Amino acid sequence: MNSLTRRRLLWGLPLGITVLAGGGFAKMLSSLRKGKFDPHKIDLPNLNKTIPNFTLEAVSSPYKNFNSSILKQQTKPVLINFFASWCLPCISEMPILKQLASQLSIWGIAYKDKINMIDLFLKHHGNPYQFLGQDNQGNIGIDWGISGIPENFLIIPGGIIRWHYAKPLDYTAISSLLSLVR
């Protein structure tokens, strides 16, 4: 390949990528306009299935490890909350979680966060968690199917995921959640 052909290829490559990306974006907008695409709809593949097996280092727990076996043995529903100190929406849902903690056991999983930042976050915003584990690498979150944080899962006895909320909690979501618990 001569240098002139290689130069044309190098100049044309970004243009080709831009055209392909633009085409994909145009298709997405067309689907959105026709009502065939909902950017807020998130696939929830783990709903009504058993929780994935996991073991986390406990940050705050009577147990040495925070794991799926302990969660499966619970006799009452548990809300699992994936959060991080660097997550602004996680801050906005903290008052709701603190209110909810009087009605439901809440277990937190700190997603890709540092222990000192988790401590500062909880000191500043309050701690609604009965147990707290740390997912340093984010692998547990991937196994659970999270698409971002915060995300919440209602786990019923036996370790079944009954409810999954993939955005910050609000009072409408809490009403829906509590109707499942009662």
Image (cartoon, rainbow, N blue to C red):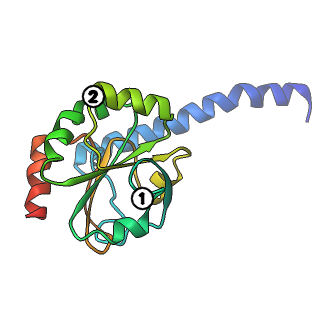
Residue in the picture at 49% in, 62% down: 54
Residue in the picture at 56% in, 46% down: 137
- Decide if residue 80 is in sight here: yes
Q: Name the residue under label 2.
A: 125
The picture quadrant where one finds residue 75 is bottom left
Q: Is residue 53 above or below residue 13?
A: below
Give the image location of residue 29, x and y in percent.
33, 39
Is residue 180 or residue 44 the one in the foreground? 180
Q: Mark 1 points at which residue?
A: 144
Is residue 124 or residue 165 the one in the foreground? 124
Of the residues under marks 2 and 1, which one precedes in the sequence?
Answer: 2
Residue in the picture at 22% in, 54% down: 105
Residue in the picture at 50% in, 60% down: 55
Mark number displayed over residue 83: none
Disc 2 residue crowd, few under 14, some 14–19, many 20+, Cα 10 Å: some
Give the image location of residue 46, x and y in percent.
36, 65
User: Tag 1: residue type?
Assistant: Trp
Badge 1 element: helix
Outermost residue toward the right in this view: 2
